[in-house]
Image (cartoon, grey):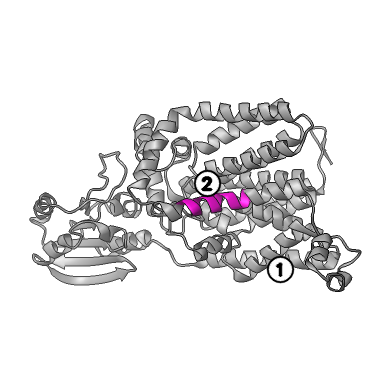
Amino acid sequence: MKLARKVIDRYDALLLIIATLWFAIGFYNLDAKSVSFDEGWSIYLSKLPVADMVRATANDIHPPLYYLLLHGWVYLVGDSVFAVRSLSIVFAGGAVVMTYFIGRTLFDKRVGALSALLFAVSSFELQVSQEARMYSLMVLLACTSMYFVIRFIRQRDLVASIGYVLATTLLVYTHVYAFFLVLAQNIFVITLVAMESRERRSRCVSWVAMQGAVLVLFAPWAFILTDQALSVEHGHITEAVDPTLQHFIGAFYQFAGSSLILLLVFAALTAVAVFAYKGRNATTFVGGITSISSLKGAIGIKNVREVSLLLLWLFIPLVVPFAISLVSPSIFSARYACAAAVAWFVLVAAGVQRIRQHAMKIGVICVVVVLSLASVHALVVSPDPVPYKMIAQDLDTTARSGDLVLVFPQDELTFGIAHYNTRTDITMSGVQAGGVSQDDIQKPTLGGVSQDDIQKLILDVNGHDRLWFIQCNSVYTQQIKNFTLVKETLLTRYNVSYYKSYGVYEVYLLTR
């Protein structure tokens, strides 16, 4: 079939089916679960004027590109939970397509199609793409940047150079983990140039010029990034964990859909993609290996360039943050390294393609797809991790007209429960604890409950014989100084008529 004078083969048609599968899975029950605190922060920023948004982002830990795009998206389609999350699904759909082109360019169309399919049925990519956050945009731009790196190495044309500079600039304006990907790219290109004599100098000059262009375009945000890095040095990233070897391996476990079987299958297929037996057939492998030297002689690496690029892409965004986190406040997060999972999908697809027996190849593909879809199903039916929606629904049915609802800390109202409140006959207010008020555009920070806060609380509840008190008891919020003082103050003035626990959230009906 021809479309616009271009031959469309079965693999291009298959890509359309895979992309349709992704959108079907991604949009299914997209708004079923509550917005997370971070999603609430994204929605909050998207509604600010652009200048205020940029100032607020400067006090955050992430660059502003995603928030600017979400600002325009909200203007066009609205600020419902489904609407704001749908932008991330669209970005991830683009990443599915780019994954196909990367696999096709590095290997062939079969690998490209299978790589895209592995992305489309990945519960890990689905989880990060069903959030109103910048992760799927980062994956799309990372894939685009990598595609132009591959094109630059093979063709080195003007389109590759301009495409790389634009994609990479947008990438570093999306997430700080982009710099680890750029590091992987530089290691690959510099090593490759150093090993090749042909056109070495001109290729190196072109690459350095491209890196310089990215740095110049990022310069307006560079000083802000320095301040953000210093704030992390004296603070804490809620997504990050203090890394151990278990956390490092756990990142690959998450990439594989949080399935131990898939983790083992992915690891085996990666080995098949990387290593190749040079003997005549696999049945004589064991008998032919009599020493370490014979093992080295029998095992080789196919597609050295392609495999090296993918391995650097996979490991550098995990290894470098892991090493940094061992000597400084942790920045290690598998979610932040979500773009690295794409490299693994391509490696796994290449491993499947190396299987010679057709029936075994089909069987492996079926097993991987079925297990991946099982992980997707488990994610879809899993409980709501943050019960904002459930709390608001219960208040809708049980609160009386005129009731006062107090939420502590206030950020839990601003960035969570407020999205689901439909009652106009009740008053909802937050108890401030060094965080964000509706009229404040500074970054949410841990603070403390002062005596002035308590006096204001007493004035707010004065005259109310019936009020609801909602408190978040997470490890993070319990670091607030004088955290228990708010509840203690209320309990000295009211009786508890109703209590319900939603995980780390407590809901009280207080009367007198």
Q: Residues within 10 Å of mark 2 (few under 14, many from 20)?
A: many
Is 280 left or right of 201, judged from the image as shown? right
User: Is there any visible trace of residue 159 in the rendered image?
Assistant: yes
Determine the secondary structure under disc 1. Answer: helix
Quarter of the view holding residue 266: bottom right
On the image, the x and y values in percent for residue 309 come to 68, 46
Decide if residue 366 is on the left or right side of residue 384.
right
Query: Upstream in the sequence, badge 2 or badge 1?
Result: 2
Which residues, given as a range, are shown in magenta? 313-324
Residue 8's x, y, as percent? 81, 42
In the image: residue 139, left or right of residue 299:
left
**Disc number at residue 88?**
2
Residue behind mark 1: 367
Q: Is residue 227 magenta?
A: no
Question: At which x and y percent is residue 161?
Answer: 66, 29
10 Å neighbourhood of mark 1: few (<14), some, or many (≥20)?
A: some
